[in-house]
Amino acid sequence: MNKRYILLLLLSFFLLAYILPLGARDLVVPDETRYGEIPREMIATGDWISPHLNGLRYFEKPALGYWVHAGFLLLFGENNFAVRLPSALAVGLTALLIYLLAGSVSRREEEEGRHRQGGFTEVLAALIYLSCFEVFGVGNTAVLDSLFTFFLTATITAFFFATESPPGSGREKGFLILAGLSSALAFLTKGFLGFVVPVLAVAPYLVWQRRYADLLRMSWLPILTAVLVSLPWSIAIHLREPDFWRFFFWNEHIRRFMADNAQHKESFWFFFLTAPGMFIPWIFAAPAAVPGIKSRLSKQGAQGRLLRFSLSWLILPFLFFSFSNGKLLTYILPCFPPFAILIALGLLQELKKDTPNRLFQGGIAVNAVLFGLIMVAFIYVQLFGFNGLRPYSRTWKAMMVVNGLVFFVLFFVWAFRSRTTINKTLLFGFSPLLLFFVVHFTVPDLTTEVKSPGPILEQYAQGISDEDIVISDENSIRAVCWYLKRNNVYLLEGAGELDYGLQYEDAKGRLLDMPSAVDLIQRNRGRTVLVARVKNVARWRARLPQPVFRDQSGPNGYVFWRY
């Protein structure tokens, strides 16, 4: 198959799964509305140094991720597409780096006279990355993890190219400077992990290669570059907000990593138990790739070096994240690029043999059976319900999901029967494409009701003036600020992640207890609005005044009350 045609297919996969349908879904709380609202407030206030949410100091992340999102809001407007586009583009750029990294090895293998897969290794590695379930899920959501992973991948890729360059050459120094630059950008996106993860990936590789002197020799230039790039904003935020670094370092790093009360606390084994599902469908191809990885691991060529580098890149960061007390599945996203490279190299090494690979055939069969069972279970639940609930009230949505699952299974069957390596692996990798596309349009009804207050807010936004008083709960406040274009919303009872910002003197009175809320409503009759989760209003109903108008988005959704 022509490589240009394959690259066109790969680009089509990226556009259909990641770019074209981005604006189809409502933003979900809390993450997407947060990463829309903080940049919106930066644009509205002109304060690009200190992040604020609802006008309150919000110091959980540095500023770069918000700057990137703000840039896309300025380019494309304040809409769902613009809020999600940075994550999706970051996935595409990461796939491009994987392509370049694997491609450099292919070219070196050709130069060294070894067999080359006609440039297909790099295509397969990029496809593996794009078609993993977690990469897709995070890459279509407005969070910072995909952007952070792109900067980390750029750092580690640049360092690998430096290790492949003549020592002391201008080429080596250029790549080391690029590594320092991208590491600084990772730091300015999510903090000190931008420095820690590259060290965990690179240092073991240099030791493995017995390049002990390079541990120091190759360190000073990227460190110096990273410090120089990071310093301007780091000093600016310290001068503007002297408490930023204390809160950010201790709360977002030390406490989250070590404290017994860390947010999202899980056991050491959490990622070991849950990560395999995130690597679907390629986790079932891993057993077939392992013999190929082992057979080339000790070789002296470029492929052997990249395999050793990728193993260091995968294993040490994965263990580091496992030792952290606080865990979310998105934390291991930086481990997906080396996984993609390892599977591509190992799989193609095994599939070039004349006999069919039973392990890969078995992995294809397991995927086909698994998603066939998922399809049967989905159809049953949609037809007969589960605990009285059905995923969709509209039949066309259910049919789209079924079509995506059928496409999934049929492509596995097609891959199983295919006889050529390129066709077999391409069919395997493209199997989730239709499902990835349709999920943008088929968010389950209950998920929309619980996680998307946008529709009810958009319905009444035009009737709320700047003089109106808006009260919200912690669950809804990011969405309220985003859809109503406000940064002065009152919080009723719990503060949640806004607790730190409310401790400042200029935030006094923004958090209301129930008596204060009732008094505020009584003093502002005719111009007060309450937006909150139904479950919270159910607890408050007896203590709140009766509204003159009420609406809600469903029994598990959100209420809109006007007084």
Image (spheres, rainbow, N blue to C red):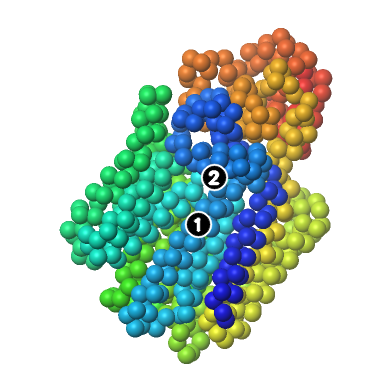
- Locate residue 48, reporting x and y percent: 49, 31
Residue at x 71%, y 9% (from the top left corner):
523
Q: Which numbered circle lies on residue 93?
A: 1
Residue closer to the observer: 74 or 481: 74
Residue closer to the observer: 111 or 485: 111
Residue 446 left/right relative to 71:
right
- Locate residue 100, reporting x and y percent: 44, 65
Residue 230 left/right relative to 461:
left
Q: Tell me the kind of residue under disc 2.
A: Val
Quadrant of the rendering where the N terminus is positioned: bottom right
Tell me which numbered mark, 2 or 1, is placed earlier along the sequence: 1
Q: CA distance from mark 2 to mark 1?
A: 16 Å
User: What is the secondary structure assignment of the residue under circle 2?
Assistant: loop
Residue at x 76%, y 13% (from the top left corner):
525
Q: Is residue 484 above or below residue 2?
A: above
Circle 2 residue: 143
Dot 1 alpha-carbon crowd within 10 angstroms: few under 14, some 14 to 19, many 20 or more: some
* Quarter assignment of residue 551: top right
Residue 476 appears anywhere in the view = no
Quadrant of the rendering where the C terminus is positioned: top right
Residue at x 63%, y 13% (from the top left corner):
516
* Quarter assignment of residue 231: top left
Q: Residue furthest front?
A: 170
Q: Residue furthest left?
A: 213
Residue closer to the observer: 523 or 40: 40
Dot 2 alpha-carbon crowd within 10 angstroms: few under 14, some 14 to 19, many 20 or more: many
Closer to the eye: label 2 or 1: 1
- Locate residue 247, reporting x and y percent: 39, 29
Q: Tell me the kind of residue under disc 1.
A: Leu
Residue at x 26%, y 49% (from the top left corner):
221
